Image (cartoon, rainbow, N blue to C red):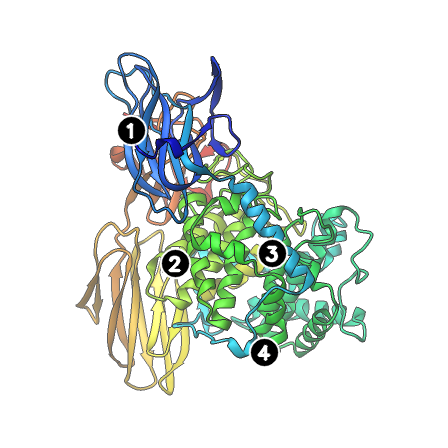
Amino acid sequence: MGKNDHCLEAINSDDEKILYYGKWAAVKEGDLQIHYSNTPYNACEFLFEGPVIRWIGTKSDTHGFADVYIDGQWMQTIDGYSPVMAAGQVLYQNALLSADRVHKIRIEVKKDRNPRATDCLQDVESFESAGSVDYVSLIRAAAVNELSQIKSGVKAYLAPDQWSPVAYAATSPETGVTLGPGVFDDCFNRNIRYLSRCFSLPFYNAGGENGWITGLPASSEGRMLGGAANTLRWGERSDMRAIVNAIVDGVQARRRVDGYCLAYDESYLNPQSEIWCDERRNYDRVNLTKGLLAAGYSGNAKAYEIVRGFYDWLNASGYYPSMLSGCFDNGSAHNCNNGHAGGIEMYFSPVGKNDDLVACERYFVQDWWLNEAGNAEPLCLDYYPYHVPHSYLILGLNAWLGHYRATGAAKYMDAAKGFWKIINEYYEHVGGTIAICEETQGAYPPKSLELGHHVGETCGSVFWAQANQQLLQFYPTQEKYCSEMEKVLYNVILACQDENGDIRYDNHIHGTKDAPQCENTCCEVNAVPFIAKLPQYIYSEANDGVYVNLFTASTIEWKHAGGTVKLTQETAFPYDPAVLMKISTDSPRKMNLRVRVPSWASSEMTLSVNSEPAVTGAPGTFVSIDRVWSGHDTVRFTLPMGFTTVKYTGIDQAADHTDRYALKYGPIVMALDDENGRVYAAAEDLPELLIPDGGLQFRVKGTPFRFAPYWQTDGNFTCYPMVQP
């Protein structure tokens, strides 16, 4: 025994502080309970204190390999093989960890094994450490303590005289972009048809007076206003203007003299069910806020007057202390973080006041959560104490970026970057769908990436794309933020929308797709205004020039260095990888043109200016062409677009443990037209079996199967087919 062994605490495998993910079973051997699994990518986690950790388990001829992670970092692959069964073995130990923080060990079952082993079993008898940590109880206690301070109004916050605003390095265009023919333009116009049809229907939806309308009527107004008003940013249309004016007039007609303007009693009492109380305080209020602000941006001055009066009433109303906890004091508020964005949106609007942001600082900011997010601890998402697990928690990331921009407080950007890592590494499927939704705590373990569960909610991907756009404005050369936006656009937004513009709630990537809806669902409320903003994601404007983030037929015209610059993209991407850009200026003008070289590019990309090679960039970067541009310059390049395969590492493994692989064509996730389809080939050889079959569809040589972009798929399909040699 080591000299410190007597100080170690043994936590047996049945202790609730050990978290098991996937298909684990338990067996009793004498007085000892053992948990075991042989399913690849099933895992368990244990949090502990002190510099020492030991994993105690069994070695035998049925045991395989396991990966060990400490604090999210891979440490070692353990071989559990032994020709003779030996229980109580120290399978992994580490005595060199820092003593002043909580650590986490993760054991992940692998499919690989010693050639002499007959199975891939792993088991846990116990963990030994200086002290165990009950993470769930720990964060709940921290949250309850902070919530009591918030509700009593004594929680410290950053006052306006301490703010040090941070300017964006590049901004998304608010106007001046026109879409040309292509998949984004089609999506944009389907959204317009959806809005026009809804405006002609009772209650603005095909579902009539349903629960989404009677319980949350302001969200319907926000959906219509956000969709129509954001459409108007890119060009005046009488049909969209009629929607904006009619709904603003309706809200104005019911507004009280003190500014309150929602369609139900201000106390939000006597709800139809418990959910509406908190949803009305937060979700409903904020979606109307966003819609009215969009109407104001589109030129409707009355909308600004209404929303300003509403927030003057709210800021003085006394309701804020209970916004985070909702109507109930039992710590089970529903979607409580929805309300955070309201004051932030107001603050940055032309009618914003410091009071709007102060209210968010005092009543929505949760420092315990900021700390956990800053440490990139994914359990703070799955076990968030005042909310069931939900993709709506990504709204915290959206809000923190607003607080950072307004105040300059580093804790917000630290939390945002940590939370970005949590989503990107633990909760994001290959195509940008988010693998978490509304369930009980612990239902969505980190890296679970379930295929058949309630995942892929359109809302979550919208919030994720919005957060990446915010980050891109702070860090415009960070290509990864463009890549995340692009994933969502091609693999969620195009896929969630049908020909009528109706919106799917979930975006299943295995099985069958959800039926599209026109009922004022939350996914419609968020997706419709997002689609209306599509032109703003293509470019970013900077003081010294412009960034080209996405590739689609479009034109941007903006003011630069005292004159006008116009850039036109001519491309049929993704059907054709060739891109021609035409730059025209009213006079010769120095400008830095930065063009994204996508991280999915299969090679370096060379750009030519006026048919002469100018610059070459590596995948995952922006290339810069800083020169004096004249009236008729051209830039040409071909996007190096090819196939890649991505191994599925979630817990929904095939019954026979055959590996699943996603196939991507550039940024596009492809779907196989049989959910049980099996392709016999090495994963790296799969692209060689693909035979073009028109558009972006491909037949698989020697099989009856066909791959098509997920957004074009219908019927039974899978984005993770089984692939084996």
- Circle nearer the N terminus (1, 4): 1
Q: Which residue in the structure is indicated by mark 3?
A: 146
Numbered disc in front, either 4 or 3: 3
Which dot, 2 or 3, sits closer to the camera?
A: 3
Q: Quadrant of residue 126?
A: top left
- Amino acid of disc 3: Glu
Tell me, yes or no, if residue 696 can be seen here: yes
Classify 10 Å Cα crowding around label 1: few (below 14), some (14-19), many (20 and above).
some
> Residue at position x 56%, y 77% from top?
160
Q: Please tell me which residue is depicted at 37% across the width and 26% down the height of the picture.
A: 56
The local crowd at label 3, few if under 14, some if 14 to 19, many if 20 or more residues have their Cα within 10 Å, is: some
Q: Is residue 657 above or below residue 375?
A: above
Q: Please provide percent x and percent y for residue 200.
A: 71, 58
The residue singled out by tag 1 in the image is: 78
> Of the residues shown, which amino acid type is indicated by label 1?
Ile
For the residue pair 78 and 98, the one nearer the viewer reads as 98
Q: Label 3 near label 1: C-beta < 8 Å?
A: no
Would you place residue 614 above or below residue 480 in this image? below
Answer yes or no: do the residues labelled 1 and 4 have beta carbons within 8 Å? no
The first of marks 4 and 3 along the sequence is 3
Q: Secondary structure at mark 2?
A: helix
